Amino acid sequence: MESVSNVRPIHLRRHVGLSMFTVATVAAVLFGVAGRTQEASGTGARLGGAVHAGSIADNTDIADIADSPAPIQLLTVATNFNNPIGIDHHAPSQGVVVSVNYPDGRPRNFELVLPTGRHQRFSGLTGFTEEVKIGSIWESGCQAGFTAGELFTGTGDPGVIARISADGDRVQRAWVRLRGESGLLRGSLFQDRFCVFGGDLIVVTTTGGVWRVTSAGAQTRVADLGAHLEGLTTVPNDVDRFGPWAGRILIGAEGQGRIYAVAADGTVESFQLGLTVEDLDIVPPDASFYGVDYAGRRIVTAGPEQWTDKVGDMVVAEENGQLWDVRWDAAAGAFAKVQLARVAQWEHVTFSTARIVTRPPTRTPESSPPPPPTPTVPTPTPTDTPVPTSTSTATPSTTPTDTPTPTDTPTSTHTPTPAVFRAYLPIGVDETCVAGHKHADVVLIVDTSTSMLAATGDGVRKIDAARAAIAVFLAQLDPAGDRAALVAFDDTATVAVPLTGDLAAVAAALAALPHHEGTRLDLGLDAARTAFDGIAPSPDRIPAVVLLTDGRPNRVPTPEGGGGQEDTVVRAAAALKATGARVYTVGFGEDVDGALLADVATGPGDAFVAPDAAALARIYAAVAVAIPCGGVYWPGGRP
C-alpha cells in the first residue's frame, strides 16, 4: 500500500451546547490532570444506572488544525493468512496474535505471528464463530490482576467471554456470561491499561451493551446504546490532550456513523465526525501499527518512526479501507481528522512493540484474485427509542451494507459479469514442514558495491551485517546434505564459491570479497544461474537463490527496443527462475527499489526489506528455515 499524498484535511468542531447530558467530573488517574465539569441541559433515560442512547444530540462542527500529521506507508507482513479478522499485541513473544479462518474458526481460531514473520498455531481452540475480535493484556502499570499476554475474546455465543492464558495452553471457553446480554462480542474487547476504569476489561456487543469486567470476573453493565458497536478503547483523563473524550470509554457505532463517549457513571455523549468506525486505537509511543486488510487477505504494518508526530492521537479505521488520524485541538476547542492511508477493507487494527519482517509492495498494479466473502452484519435498530441522525454532517463516503450474510466484495479492478458465479469452498490446512526429507542447493548473491561499506542507522557496516546474517543462515543449513554457493556482484559478477557442502568455505570467502563501484543486479542473477549449470534436477533437492542488495541497479544496459535498467534485471531474474530455482530477495536499508525486488522474487511472499542489521538477521534465519519447506508462506508459498 503506497502512502497517501495530496490529502486535504477535514476538520471538525464539537458543539458543547448540543450535549443533552450533564457530564460528571472525572478524577485524574493516569496523568494527574484535574477533571472537568461540563454543564448542559436535557435528560437521559436510565435503567439500573445504564444510559439508553435514545436522544443524544451529536457534536459536529468544523475547525482548523495547525499541523497536519504526515500520511503513512503500509507494508505487508511477510506471511499469508486465511480470512483474518482480529489482531492484538502479544507481550510474551513480542509478536501479534491473529484470529483466522472466519467464519467457522476451523481448523483453528488463532495464530501467533513471530518477529521473523512466521506464524504458528496459538492454543488448541477451534470452532469459535463469527468475527472473533481479540483483547490482549499489555504490560502496563494498570494490569489490575490480569496477566500480560492473556487474551479475551467472544465465542460466537451471545454474551460469552472466553479467557486464554498467555501461552495458549489453558482456555476458559465461558469465563464470563454477561447477564441478560443477547448481543455477540464481535465488536471489541479492551483492557483499560490507562487506569480510568480501574484496569477492568471493557466489552461492547452487537446490541449496544457496554460492560466492564474485573480480572475476577465481576461484571457491571455501564450503558446500553441500542446500536451495533465496533471499535473500543478507554481514553486517558487528560482534558488538554483528548478534550471531551478524556476519561471515557470511546466506542464506534459503524451503522450510525457515530462515536460514543461513555463516562464511568453511564452518561453518554455522541459525536458525528463523518466516520463509520470499524476500529480505533490511541497511538502509543515506540510501537508499530498492525491492521487486518480482510479483502486483501493480509496483515499490514507501519513502523514507529511513522508515528512520532501522532503519539496520543486517535487512529480510526473504516471498513471501506480508509485510515484516519483524529486529534483534539485544545486551542480551537475542536477535533480534526486527516486521512493517513487506505487499503481494501479494514477489520481489526492495533499497535504493538513487535517488529515483524515485512515485504515490499509490488512494482506495478496487478489484477487481484477476488477476495473471500466479506464479513458483514445487519445494523441493529435500537429498540428503546430511536437515535436521531444529524443532518449537518457530510455523508460518509461509504455506507455500511445492511446484509445478514457474507457477500462477495470485488476488488477495485474487477467488473462483475452476470454470467460468472464464484463459489468459495472451505479448506483446512495445517502448515507443517517435515524437516530432513529434502535438501537445499542455495546460491547466495551478495552486493559488494562500495555502498555496502557504509554504516546502517545502528552503526554497523552493511557488509558486516550481511556477513553476520549469512553466518546465521549457514548455521541453520544441514551440513550433511545442504549445499551453498556464493556470488558477488558490483560492476561485474563472479561465482566466488561454487555449490559445495563445505559451508565454512562459503563464510570464509564472504569475509574476503573485494568491493567496487556499480550495482549490476542483472549480472549477479546471471552468475547465479550459471552456478546451477551441470546440477541435474532431483526431487530430493530444492534449488534456491537469496539475493541481497542495498541499492538500485546502475550501469545496467537497457534492453534493445526500449525499456529501462529495471527491465533488464527482470529479464535476468526470469531466466534464473526458469531453471526451477526459487528466488528470495532482500533489500537492505532505505535506498532500495522494493518494487523491483518484488518482481525479481519468485512470489510476493519472497521479497523482504530490512531496515537494520537485526532485521536482516531475522530475515535470513526465516528464509533458511523456509527453503527446505518450499517457501515461507501459504497460500502460494508451496510448489
Image (cartoon, rainbow, N blue to C red):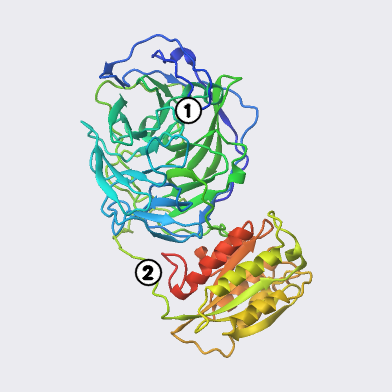
Q: Is residue 230 left or right of residue 128?
A: right
Q: Nearer the viewer, residue 401 or 511?
A: 511
Q: Which quadrant of the view contains residue 134? A: top left
Q: Quadrant of the C terminus?
A: bottom left
Residue 395: x, y in percent?
Answer: 45, 30
- Label 1 Cα neighbours within 10 Å, binned few <14 / some 14-19 / many ≥20: many
Distance Cα–Cα, label 1 vs label 2: 47 Å
Q: Earlier in the sequence, mark 1 or mark 2?
A: 1
> Which residue is painted at 59% across and 78% down in the image?
443
| Coordinates of residue 43 in the picture (x, y in percent) | 34, 11
| Residue 460 tag number | none
Where's residue 175, x and y in %? 26, 42
Q: Amino acid at mark 2?
A: Thr
Per the image, the residue denoted by label 2 is 432
- Residue 295 can be seen in this image: no
Q: Secondary structure at mark 2?
A: loop
- Which label sits in the foreground, 1 or 2? 2
Measured from the top left, where is residue 532 in percent x and y?
58, 85
Residue holding disc 1: 273
**Going by the picture, which residue comes out furthest to the left?**
180
Q: Which kind of residue does numbered mark 1 sit on? A: Leu
Indicate the quadrant where residue 613 lies: bottom right
